[in-house]
Image (tube, rainbow, N blue to C red):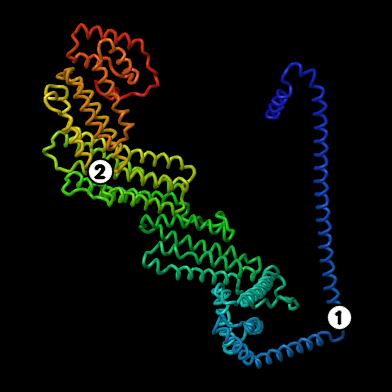
């Protein structure tokens, strides 16, 4: 009641939201609710009245039925009384009745004797008709129903005779059993033949013997009907024990038939035959533990079920539900096979094949046979696919770590000892075998996972491969930095050939990035949509990692190169520079290195030349700030021009003239600033500042202070003017940094 009251209040609060609603809405709402209540009451009254009418009709029917039963009982009693009274009305009725019984017994005895006389002849005829069918189940079975009919009659005759003679002396029983021995043998042979047919339903339809199956089912149905009749007689006997001694009760003798339960036995024989079919099909694979071969040989399951649906099902009554029976039998044997497999120590490939089989199995059952996964019980692998996935990932992880560790150990040894030069490809590029070997391993795992038709599994395998890629990148970066440090700090104590191996490593990393990019192109479209973004992110990260290692290798080559020539830059603009040209030796060294660098991937080589030019320009600019640097204006400008011309011509071999002019522009503008007179120096500084907004004032002051044509007072005046100009100039905040931002001041 409280709940109803609360609901009513909530409903009213929704209908009457404002005070004005009490005057404008209450009347219409009252009328509306009254109509609804009247309608509901009318419906309830009608429903209740209808139910009462049905109950009343049921009670009346029960009353009439009870009256009819009592009337039948009374009529039966009257009939029995009339029969009993009629006996006293007939003269000598007991004698007539006895003579009638004697006659009946005589006729029955005569029929029994005649049946015994004809028994062996009938058996001969039946055996002759049965023999061809018994010898070949694929032979025409036109006489099968004929043999069964007459054998059925002989069995009835045998059962009735043995039942009637159950109280006879033992020797009589033995004699009768001897007479009926051939019936027993033929009956057993015929029954075994029926079960042989039942065990070969599929071979029968394959050999065009569908009519034999129909006859088999007719025989089973006939025997089932006889069983039901016998069971009904026995049930009647047990329900009417009070009439057992009544001579006129027809069921007093009982039904002597032995219950055969042919339909139950038919299913049992079918079950045994299908079990033998599976054992025979998979025994060779189990013996050799070829589990993938076992899975590959399961096509017969779907082919035979299709045959059952098309050829066997139409020959059975619907109540047999023969197709669901076959489906579940095949499914349960498949379930048992897979359970045996998962108990074994399976390798990674077999686990994936098993997972793919389960997915394909359910798909094929649905598409080819129309059997959904929900109908197939028990579930294959008992729903433990995730456990298998985990086992597979452990195997993949262990194998990947094992293979890559061996690979890294071998390659790192070659990289450190450098006893032999690295491998060279036909196009003249140095390389290591690691890239190809590593991605052969990775692609193999990804391909196998993709074939398993498991979207999430493919993502998990890619994730494991990504970990291996990142681990290899970390390994190579540490090893590269370690060997570079040794080369720079103790060049005399390390083996030769680091440059060649660093080039090989750089080329390898570019190959790895290309291989990873190939995976990025082909995997996301086939991976589960829920993991597509994650796969793309991981593979993109791996590609970036390889490019970073390649960049680190390029930087290492740059460090080794300039480690040889950096001391020369310390002497630029010093007395030694004025005594003899120094840049030619630098260019010769760079030329030698660049000849070696021809074994690099073209992409890396171009980037290296770009970085080399940057480093050259930075060192040249830094040299102007050295403590011992002096600008003797009579000769330094010409020498700088010679240095620029020589270096420009060298780098122009590898870079376009337009780019070279753009890159050497900074030297050109600094050169202009150096040669500028006192009146024009502000203009030249402004030009430099416009092109290079990040040029430090300290750099300008430093190089101007080294000019021998400017005294301190003149320099002071110039710098005050330059600083004033610098304060007036506001560079664009979006201007990208220039070479001056990369120089350490």
Q: Nearer the viewer, residue 354 or 682?
A: 682
Assess disc 2: are there few (<14), some (14-19) or many (≥20) residues with their C-alpha within 10 Å of its C-alpha. Answer: some
Residue at 40% x, 54% y is 448
Task: Using the image, tell me which numbered label, if any, was put on residue 598.
Answer: 2
In the picture provided, is 553 more to the left or to the right than 192? left
Query: On the rendered image, what quadrant is the C terminus found in?
Result: top left
Q: Which residue is mark 1?
A: 88
Q: Is residue 356 visible?
A: yes
Assess disc 1: are there few (<14), some (14-19) or many (≥20) residues with their C-alpha within 10 Å of its C-alpha. Answer: few
- As helix, strand or loop, the secondary structure at mark 1 comes to helix
Q: Nearer the viewer, residue 77 or 278?
A: 278
Query: On the rendered image, what quadrant is the N terminus found in?
Result: top right
Q: Give the percent coordinates (x, y) of residue 408.
A: 25, 46
Query: Of the residues under marks 1 and 2, which one precedes in the sequence?
Result: 1
- As helix, strand or loop, the secondary structure at mark 2 comes to helix
Image quadrant assignment for residue 119 = bottom right
- Residues at circles 1 and 2 in contact by the CB criterion of under 8 Å: no
Residue at 37% x, 14% y is 730
Q: Nearer the viewer, residue 415 or 180?
A: 415
């Amino acid at each position: 009641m409280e709940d109803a009251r609360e609901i009513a209040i909530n409903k009213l609060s929704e209908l009457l939201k404002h005070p004005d609603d009490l005057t404008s809405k209450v009347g219409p709402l009252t009328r509306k609710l009254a109509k609804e209540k009247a309608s509901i009451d009318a419906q309830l009254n009608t429903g209740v009245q209808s139910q009462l009418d049905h109950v009343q009709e049921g009670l009346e029917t029960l009353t009439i039925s009870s009256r009819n039963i009592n009337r039948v009982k009374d009529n039966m009693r009257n009939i029995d009384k009339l029969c009993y009274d009629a006996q006293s009305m007939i003269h000598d009725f007991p004698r007539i009745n006895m003579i009638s019984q004697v006659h009946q017994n005589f006729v029955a005895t005569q029929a029994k004797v005649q049946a015994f006389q004809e028994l062996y002849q009938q058996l001969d005829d039946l055996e002759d008709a049965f023999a061809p069918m018994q010898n070949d189940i694929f032979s025409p079975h036109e006489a099968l129903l004929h043999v069964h009919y007459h054998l059925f009659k002989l069995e009835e005759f045998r059962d009735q005779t043995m039942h009637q003679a159950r109280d006879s002396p033992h020797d009589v029983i033995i004699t009768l059993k001897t007479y009926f021995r051939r019936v027993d043998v033929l009956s057993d042979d015929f029954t075994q033949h029926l079960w042989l047919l039942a065990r070969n339903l599929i071979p029968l339809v394959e050999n065009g013997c569908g009519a034999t199956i129909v006859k088999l089912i007719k025989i089973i149905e006939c025997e089932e009907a006889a069983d039901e009749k016998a069971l009904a007689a026995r049930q009647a006997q047990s329900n009417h024990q009070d009439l057992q001694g009544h001579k006129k009760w027809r069921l007093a003798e009982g039904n002597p038939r032995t219950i055969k339960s042919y339909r139950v036995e038919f299913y049992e024989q079918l079950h045994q035959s299908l079990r033998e079919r599976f054992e025979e099909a998979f025994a060779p694979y189990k013996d050799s533990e070829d589990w993938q071969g076992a899975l590959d040989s399961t096509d017969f399951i779907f082919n035979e079920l299709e045959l059952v649906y098309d050829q066997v099902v139409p020959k059975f009554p619907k109540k047999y539900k023969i197709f669901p029976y076959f489906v579940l039998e095949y499914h349960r044997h498949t379930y048992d096979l897979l359970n045996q497999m998962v108990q074994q120590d399976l390798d990674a490939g077999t686990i994936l094949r098993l997972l793919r089989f389960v997915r394909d199995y359910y798909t094929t059952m649905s598409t080819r046979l129309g059997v959904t996964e929900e109908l197939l019980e028990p579930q294959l692998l008992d729903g433990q696919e995730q456990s298998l996935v985990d086992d597979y990932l452990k195997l993949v992880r262990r194998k990947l770590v094992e293979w890559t560790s061996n690979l890294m150990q071998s390659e790192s040894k070659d990289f450190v000892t450098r006893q032999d030069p690295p491998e060279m490809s036909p196009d003249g590029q140095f390389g290591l075998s690691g890239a190809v070997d590593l991605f052969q391993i990775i692609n193999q795992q990804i391909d196998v996972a993709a074939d398993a038709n498991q979207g999430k599994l493919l993502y998990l395998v890619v994730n494991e491969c990504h970990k291996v890629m990142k681990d290899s990148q970390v390994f190579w970066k540490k090893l590269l930095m370690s060997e570079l440090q040794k080369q720079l700090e103790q060049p005399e104590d390390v083996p030769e050939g680091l440059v060649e191996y660093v080039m090989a490593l750089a080329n390898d990393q570019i190959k790895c990035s290309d291989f990873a990019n190939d995976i990025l192109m082909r995997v996301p479209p086939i991976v589960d949509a829920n993991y597509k973004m994650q796969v793309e992110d991981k593979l993109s990260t791996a590609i970036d990692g390889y490019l970073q290692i390649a960049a680190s290798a390029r930087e290492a080559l740059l460090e080794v190169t300039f480690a040889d020539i950096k001391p020369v830059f310390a002497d630029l603009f010093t007395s030694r520079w004025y005594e003899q040209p120094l840049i030619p030796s630098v260019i010769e060294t760079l030329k030698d290195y660049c000849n070696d660098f021809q074994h690099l991937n073209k992409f890396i080589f171009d980037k290296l030349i770009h970085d080399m030019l940057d480093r050259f320009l930075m060192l040249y600019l830094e040299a102007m700030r050295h403590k011992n640097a002096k600008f003797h204006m009579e000769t330094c400008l010409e020498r700088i021009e010679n240095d620029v011309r020589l270096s420009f011509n060298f780098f122009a071999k590898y870079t376009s003239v337009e780019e070279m002019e753009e890159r050497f522009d900074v030297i050109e503008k600094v050169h202009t600033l150096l040669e500028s007179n006192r009146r024009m120096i502000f203009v030249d500084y402004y030009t430099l500042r416009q092109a290079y907004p990040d040029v430090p004032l300290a750099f300008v002051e430093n190089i101007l202070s080294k000019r021998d044509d400017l005294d301190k007072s003149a320099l002071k005046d110039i710098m005050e003017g330059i600083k004033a100009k610098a304060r007036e100039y506001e560079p664009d905040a979006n201007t990208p940094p220039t070479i001056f931002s990369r120089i350490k001041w």
